[in-house]
Structures are given as C-alpha cells and as structure tokens.
Amino acid sequence: MGKKGVLLMNVGTPDEPTVASVKTYLREFLLDPDVIDIPAPLRHLLVRGIILRTRPRKIAPLYKKIWMDDGSPLRVYSKRITDNLSELNQDIDFEFAMRYGNPSIRDGLEKLRSRGVEELLLLPMFPHYAQATTESSLKHAYKQLAAIDWTPTLLEMGHFETAEEFIVPLSESIRPHLSEDTHLLFSYHGLPVSHVKRIDFSNKHCQTVENCCAVPCDANRLCYGRHCHETTMAVVEHLGLTPDQWSLSYQSRLGPVKWLEPSTTKTVEALVKKGVHKLAIVAPAFLADGLETLEELNIGIREEFIEHGGTELKVINCLNDDQQWIEGLEQLIRKEFDAVPA
C-alpha cells in the first residue's frame, strides 16, 4: 500500500467567542439534518426563526469564560492530539478537522492529498456511534472527497466504546480522583430518543425492553445508549467499583423533544439528596475538553451541586493529549491499517 494518512474529525467550535462567530457556527451545526432530524422547512424555521435569534447571545459569554490564549479549547486540544500522534508515528500523516467550522474537513483532506497520501483513515473522534456525530462526519468527508475528486484507499474507524486502548487510559485518568466517600458520575452527551430509536431496525427493543441500553442485541448494535452503557461498565470493572459508587446520566439538552434519561442536572440533585457530598464527574463521550465540560459541567453543574448542598466536586479532564491515551489511540490506528490485506 502507499503512504498512509489519518483525518481526525471532531464536532466543531466557533472561531471566536463572539455573538457573530457563535451564530455562524450554530447555523452550520443545527441546520444539519443529522443533528435536527425534522423536515427541512421546519428545521429552517426553528433554527433561523427561533434559535439563532436568541441562543448566540447566551452562548458567546460562556465561550469567553473558557477561551484559551491559543483559541478555542476544543481546537487547541485537537491540535495537540494530532501533533502528539505525528511525533509518535512519523510513518503516518495526521491532520485534524471540524465537522462544523474550522479547520474544515475539506481543508484537512486537501492537505493530506498534497502530501501524497494514498491510504486514508477517516477517524471520527467519538468513542460511541451516533448519527449526529460519527455518521454526519463520515458522510461529509465522503462528500468532500467527491468534490475534490480524490479517491484514496479508504478506511473508517466507526466506534471504540470498549477498546482496551480507550478504556485503560480513561480509567486511569479517573482513579486519582476517587476515594471511599467519592461518588463517580459518568455524564454523557445527551441525544434525542428519536435518534436512538431509529437505530432499532426491529422496532421491538429500544424504549420497549426494560433497561434496553443494558441489554445487548443485534437491534441495538449501533445504539449510542448501549455504547455509553458498555463504556461505563468496562470502566467500572477496571476500577473495581461497586453499584453504589457510580451513576450514569446525560447532559447538553436542547429543545423540548424527549431526550435520553436521566439528565445530569436531575441526577446531581438526586445524589445530594441521597447524601452524596463528594462527587467526581467524568465525560467519556468527549475526547477533548470544550464548552460541555469546561463550562456546562465545571461551572454550571458545579454551581447546582453546591446550591443543593454538595461540598466537593471534581470534573475530571477529558483525555486530551494524555500520553497513555495518545499511545492507545496510535495503537487503534495501527490496528486499522494492519487489518487491510496486503
């Protein structure tokens, strides 16, 4: 095979913590039919007529709270991950891109093509499959490949929710923050129930079978909720936690539709009422810190926890450029290339 390349794809971020920049970013993000899956006229009415009129003014100040000297945290950490991978494996060309915003997927593809890449791995930076993240990133990458008329040998890394190379670094990043009286909350990015129900081709399992995400079957093989559950259980087993030492919840809701339960906000309140005063939160759906972890959890949820009577909360950093994780990710990448017949 020819020269190898990897395009790491994350969700995206505004270019600046300003109302105008946030509005541009949200417009591209929310108008994606894989994100808001309603008929196009209704989606445009909702996004352009309602959300974009108010939400950018609310979100821009939140970005300002977490903005780093080098820019958006998500972009900064994505670049660090890419740079570290490049240092670790100089036989492969690495680029990172954002599904929405900059650097764009098209820019990343053109850079890799200019360096003579012939075998390309598309790597959505999401351990758990979802149409709104994994599928949307891959579809857009294929669209851009066609637009620039580039036809390398293509590989995909779809999801890796229980891969040892992911679970071990994740677990070890959690371990230093646990004690006998610390409760661990796994807070995953939320997803509308409609997104997970469409994955169930049988129409007999999702939201029908009791505790459906914890019951593996063909019908939920690509279910985001199942993947989150499996990551949680793999970490719980690795750390040797008992059932009363951990909980699972979902954050980052938008709009009035039904979302995966329980919500992080309600879970934190319930835990305090049960007597939990020391809480550690980990967000395994995010491989790089951004607004959802640095502001929503570390500022917003922290305030709610204290208001309800909690005393000590630790939001555990995403894996970011943790060396053990970089080595694990490089191993996952090598496995994908090694699986290709010579």
Image: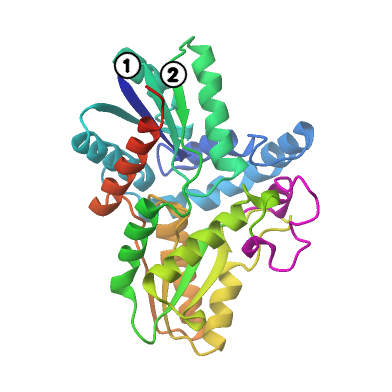
The quadrant the N terminus occupies is top left
Image colouring: rainbow
Q: Is residue 71 visible?
A: no
**Badge 2 is on which residue?**
153
Q: Position of residue 253 (x, y in %)?
A: 61, 57
Q: Position of residue 129 (x, y in %)?
A: 56, 46
User: Could you tell whether 126 is left or right of 30 in the image?
Assistant: left
Circle 1: residue type: Gly
87 w.r.t. 118: above or below: below
The reply to whether callout 1 and callout 2 are in contact (CB within 8 Å) is yes
**Badge 1 is on which residue?**
2
Name which residue lies at 47% across and 13% down. Answer: 151
**What residue range appears in magenta?**
190-215
Q: Nearer the viewer, residue 143 or 308?
A: 143
Res 152 label? none
Q: Nearer the viewer, residue 246 or 204?
A: 204
